[in-house]
Image (cartoon, rainbow, N blue to C red):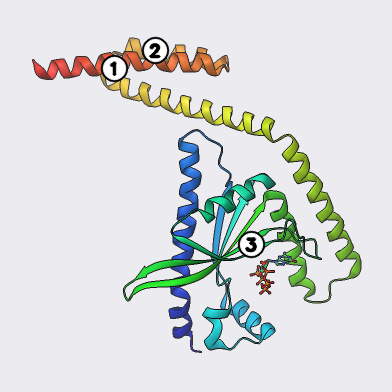
Amino acid sequence: MDIKLWREILHPYEMAVDELTLKFNNIIKEYRTLGEYSPIEMVDGRVKKISSILEKCQKKGILLEEVCEKVDDIAGIRIICQFVEDIYKVVELINSRTDIRVVERKDYITNMKASGYRSYHMVIEYTIQTMKGPNVVKAEIQIRTLAMNFWATIEHSLQYKYRRNMPPHIRERLSAASAAIINLDAEMSRIRDEIMDSQNSFRIKANIITEILNLIQNLYKVANKREIIKIQDEFYRVYSHDDIIELEHFLTELDVLAEGYRAQGIEDQLI
Ligand code: 0O2
C-alpha cells in the first residue's frame, strides 16, 4: 500500500480521535463547572503508527485490505480515572451515549491478564461526518486508574525492549509490582471520600477566588481608587484566614456592591 493510501485510510481515525478526545474532555469540564467530582481525571488519544499496524497484521495474519475491519485499535482513546469505582461509572457513561455504539468489552480488571495487566477495554463504533458523507469507524477505549496506567506504561516499554524474551526475573518483579498496584488502588478506594472532599473544597475555593478577582477587576472601572484599595486589603485579610465560609461571605458582599454600581449605571443611562 502506498503512503498516500495510508494517509487516506488513517484520516477518518484521526478525526474520530480528535472528536472523542474533545467530547471526553468536555465531560470533565461539565462536571467541574457544576463543582462536582469528575470520574474522568484525564483523556488521551492516538492513531496507531503504520509500523505498529503492519506488525499487528503480520502477527494476526490480517490482510492489508482487511485492516479497517479487523484491527480494532487504529483509533485509541485512553481514559484515566483516580479510583477503580470511577472506571465503572465511565463505562456506564459511555453505554448511555447515543453517539457511541459499544460493540465489544473486555474487563481485564475483574479478569486480570497473566502479565498482571489491568484495564477496562471497549471497542466502539463512532460516526464521523466527512465530505463524502457519514463514515463509521472503530475505536478502542481503554479505561484505567492512574496506578494501572503507571504499571502498563512501564511494562509496555519493557515488552518493547525485550520483545518476546523478557527475562523471568523481570517478569516476576512486574507481577509483584502489579499486586502492589492492586493494593494501592484498594487503599485509595478506602480513603476515597476523604480525598474527594479535599479535592472538592480545593476546587470550590479556587472558583470563589476567581469570582472575587473578576468582580474586583470590574469594580476598577467604576469604583474610586480609595474604595478599590480598601476592597483589596479586605480580600487579602479574608484570604489569609483560609476559611471558605468567610470567602463566600466576602463574595456575596462584593456582589451586592457590584450590583449597586450596575443599577446606578443603568439609572445614569436612563437620565
Ligand atoms: P499498543 O502499542 O498499546 O497499541 P491484540 O491487541 O489484538 O493483540 P487483543 O486480545 O485483541 O490483543 O486485545 P487486548 O487484549 O484488548 O489488547 C489491546 C491493547 O491492550 C494492547 O494493544 C495494549 O495497548 C493493551 N494491552 C493488552 N495486554 C497488555 C499487557 O499485557 N501489557 C500492556 N502494557 N498492555 C497491554 P497493542 O496493539 O498490543 O499495543
Could you tell me how far apart the alpha carbons at marks 3 and 1 are, in whole angstroms?
A: 51 Å
Q: Nearer the viewer, mark 2 or mark 3?
A: 3
| Of 147 and 96, the residue lying toward us | 96
State yes or no: discs 2 and 1 in contact (Cβ < 8 Å). Answer: no
Mark 1 C-beta closer than 8 Å to ligand 1? no
Q: Where is residue 96 in the image (x, y as percent from the top left)?
A: 50, 53
Q: Circle 1 sits on which residue?
A: 259
Looking at the rendering, the quadrant in which ligand 1 lies is bottom right
Q: Give me the residue at 29% from left, 13% from top.
A: 224
State the SS at label 3: strand
In which image quadrant can residue 134 be found?
Answer: bottom left
Q: Residues within 10 Å of mark 3 (few under 14, many from 20)?
A: many
Residue located beneath label 2 in the image: 253
Distance from the alpha carbon under mark 2 to that under mark 1: 10 Å
Residue 132 bears which disc, if any? Answer: none
Q: Image quadrant of residue 122? A: bottom right
User: Which amino acid type is shown beneath numbered disc 2?
Assistant: Glu
Q: Residue 121 bears which disc, if any? A: 3
Q: In which quarter of the image is residue 58?
A: bottom right
Q: Does 199 appear above or below 111? A: above
* Circle nearer the viewer, 3 or 1: 3
Disc 3 residue lies near ligand 1 with CB under 8 A: yes
